[in-house]
Image (cartoon, rainbow, N blue to C red):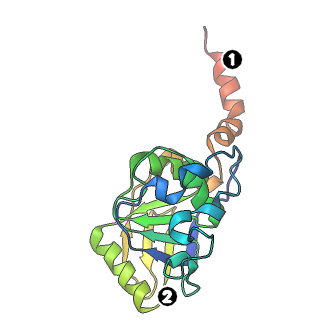
Amino acid sequence: MAYDKFNILNSTAVPLSIENVDTDQIIPARFLKATERVGFGDNLFRDWRYKNDDTPKTDFVLNNDTFSGKILVGGKNFGSGSSREHAAWAIYDYGFRCVVSSFFADIFRNNCLNVGVLPVQVSPEFLEQIFSAIEANPQTSLTVDLSNQKITLDATGDNESFEINPYKKENMINGFDDIDYLINIKEDIRTFSKNTPL
């Protein structure tokens, strides 16, 4: 399944300044029954967003109209816990295209890259600077430049570089998942197979 191409994202951001956010908090286990990658956004952070009677918790950031955007800014150690890929699906389905943190769990990072969500790891100092800027002005915007691997706080111009696997970078720029990538190079594969003795 192809995903949105990602090159430069300029957006306001939603601040979730909580450390050690695990995948069960991102998408609780009871919502993992579906097999298609749609509808999970409705239950993103379900137990933090809603009370037992399904009414919204007004103090949770996703229920606060002050904040919006395609970038989720999370605390340190985002995506820890179980390896469920549904956590990345839920983030994508909700509308986020980038998650910023000072540390990601490896499996969560890879799951995000597989579905078109860019995990941007920054220094703790720059993360705190981003949180402070958003708190001071919820309309603060960030520019995430995947080609140049740079994230910029637009109001000040302060920026940091980030790392990404070159193969995953190419896929995100083209909007490919692993299958799309293989289909795109099928002629190269056929040529290699034809010219390579068994």
* Residue 194, numbered label: 1
Query: Where residue 130 sits: x, y (%)?
Result: 38, 79
User: Which residue is drawn at the image coordinates 63% and 45% (left, top)?
Assistant: 177
* Residue 41, numbered label: none
Q: Is residue 180 above or below residue 138?
A: above
Q: What's the distance in space between the residues labelled 1 and 2, CA to CA?
A: 57 Å
Q: Is residue 160 above or below residue 112?
A: below
Residue 162 versus residue 72: which sits nearer the camera?
A: 72
Please tell me how crowded label 1 is: few (under 14), some (14-19), or many (20+) other residues with Cα within 10 Å: few
Residue 80 versus residue 163: which sits nearer the camera?
A: 80
User: Which residue is drawn at the image coordinates 55% and 54% (left, top)?
Assistant: 88
Residue 115 versus residue 187: which sits nearer the camera?
A: 115
Dot 2 corresponds to which residue?
138
Q: Is residue 22 left or right of residue 188?
A: left
User: Which residue is drawn at the image coordinates 50% and 77% (left, top)?
Assistant: 60
Among the two numbered marks 1 and 2 on one chain, the one whose residue lies closer to the N terminus: 2
Amino acid carrying label 1: it is Lys
Query: Where residue 91 sits: x, y (%)?
Result: 57, 61
Mark 2 secondary-structure assignment:
loop
Amino acid carrying label 2: it is Pro
